Amino acid sequence: MSRRRRKPDFFDDGVLVVDKPAGPTSHDVVERLRRRFRPAKLGHTGTLDPFATGVLVLAFNRATRMSNMLGSGNKIYAGTVSLGTATDTGDPTGEVIETAPVPQISPEQAQAALAALEGERQQAPPAYSAAKHQGKPLYAYARQGVAVEKPARAINVGQTKLVAVESGEIAFELTCSKGTYVRSLAEDLARELGTVGHLKQLRRLASAPFSLGEALELDEALDLSPQELAGRLIGLSQALERAGLPAMEVDADTAWQVRQGMILPRETFLTPGSGPAQGAFRVLTPEGELVAVLRWLEPGERRPGRDYESMRVFPEQDQGEIEEQTSASAIGAE
């Protein structure tokens, strides 16, 4: 007999930044918080490997509908490359598959090798990664000894910084675009220095616009009451504002029309000084309630009478529903 899923208890929308510990998967962190608070929906905006620590951005309830946008910013990492040994996973959890001598490396040589990683480059997902192939993660194929090659995709490595060179290890910091595999960069760095290596440690310091300074330890988050959790969430509209989405305030009638899917004249969402009509933007009521996220179409996408598209529309919550949800959130989770 299938087990009935319990009704959700927590209905607040928003983002919680957690400092993920080493060991659990990102999915494990989500499941622990799901069992604790029983939200209607809960997800994360970008995976961290089990051995990695740091910023894991969690999206509660309606914020899950904007996870891709909230997780699209650049990432900042601090890591350590262990030179002389390569593993099948590219990290300390794998089996050693190659060894090589480690030459004497000066700080200047290490910094030059790091600088060589900067800029746009093509990178294919490693075999042991969560990238999907025919609905299954690549690591599932790798564990079965099945080789699957995925096409390389463009990534961008921003500024790199050498932290230390000592005992066959290089500690560094770098900024990179979403979807970058730092394990692969660590292997590239080792090859640039004339040896092999793997990523020994990794800590995500930021997933823009969210940073480690605002993160809660996982155990600290689990110890919150539902009311305390609601108070710690970054509201969805505020999180989108931090992600760079401007706001356009509309009256109640226009908000209703947007929620009904009506296509309105472009002038509805433009005011003097509002800037060029490009990119995504938030539509808010005078009370600050999030109505929708819309996106201006590019010139080649536009059609007569249609200058924007709806990315997400957020239905209005009536007062009875709000009171019911507030009451349920106050009950607590077992």
Image (spheres, helix red, strand yellow):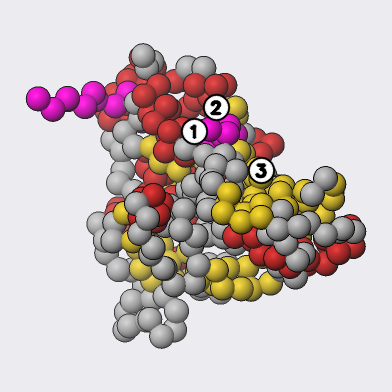
Residue 10 versus residue 101 in the image, above or below:
above
Seen from the viewer's position, the closer of residues 183 and 191 is 191
Q: Start and end of the magenta stretch?
A: 1-23
Which residue in the rendered view is the most extreme toward the left? 1
Looking at the image, can residue 287 be seen? no
The location of residue 311, given as percent across then percent down, is 37, 61
Q: Earlier in the sequence, mark 3 or mark 1?
A: 1
Contact (CB < 8 A) between labels 3 and 1? no
Give the residue number, with chain letter if any, for mark 1.
24
Relative horizontal placement of residue 220, taking residue 79 as reference (left or right): left
Q: What is the x, y in percent for residue 183?
A: 60, 55
Q: Amino acid at mark 2?
A: Leu
The alpha-carbon separation of the residues under discs 2 and 1 comes to 11 Å
User: Dot 2 corresponds to which residue?
Assistant: 218
Is there a contact, CB below 8 Å, between mark 2 and mark 1?
Answer: yes
Helix, strand or loop status at disc 1: loop
Q: Amino acid at mark 3?
A: Gln
The tag earlier along the polypeptide, 3 or 2, is 3
Element carrying mark 3: strand
State whether residue 135 is above or below residue 205: below
Q: Which residue is mark 3?
A: 201
Left or right, 92 with respect to 267, comes to right
Q: List x then y, in percent, for residue 302.
A: 37, 81
SS label for mark 2: helix
Residue 281 located left or right of residue 180: left
* Quadrant into which the C terminus falls: top left
> Magenta span: helix, strand or loop, mainly?
loop
Q: CA distance from mark 3 to mark 2?
A: 19 Å
Please tell me which residue is depicted at 37% across the width and 55% down the height of the picture.
Answer: 145
